Amino acid sequence: MTTEAVPSIVERAIAARAVESGVPSPCISICRISAESGFCEGCLRTIDEIAAWSRTSDADKRSVWRAIELRAQAGFLSGAEDKP
């Protein structure tokens, strides 16, 4: 698979927000919280967002995905971690 075929986290966020139920987790198994930003280097969630994910409503999960999209657009994600 080429890197062109791998959706960016922004593309994944847009797709995840369109899901009516069973909103997917943004986790890509790169679980390191950046000391500078406070966001996971893999999925751009905060530790509180990660901890609450399994009990979060689909509506709130879509809100987290929107926050992830904005964080990625603001440059908080390095290209190496921008993988599904």
Image (tube, helix red, strand yellow):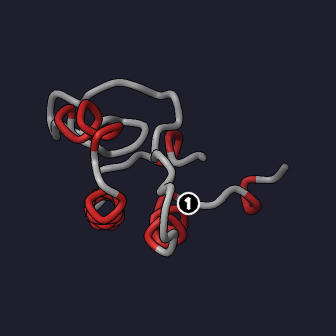
The local secondary structure at tag 1 comes to: loop
71 and 79: which is toward the camera: 71
In the rendered structure, the answer to whether residue 71 lies left or right of residue 3 reads: left
Q: Which residue is situated farthest in the right direction here?
A: 1
Q: Amino acid at mark 1?
A: Ser
Is 12 positioned to the left or the right of 72 in the image?
right
How many numbered marks are there? 1
Residue drawn at x 36%, y 36% is 41
Front residue of 56 and 50: 56
Q: What x and y, as percent, mark residue 71?
A: 27, 59
Could you say where residue 20 lies in the image, as x and y percent from the top left?
Answer: 48, 71
- Please tell me which residue is depicted at 16% across the width and 40% down the height of the picture: 37
Q: Label 1, on which residue?
A: 8
- Picture quadrant where residue 32 is located: top left
Q: Is residue 3 left or right of residue 18?
A: right
Residue at 45 percent of width and 64 percent of height: 13
Near mark 1 (Cα within 10 A), the count class, few <14, some 14-19 or many ≥20, is some
Name the residue located 40 percent from the left edge and 25 percent from the top edge. 31
Q: Position of residue 72 (x, y in %)?
A: 35, 59
Foreground residue among 31 and 26: 26
In this view, 8 is above or below 49: below
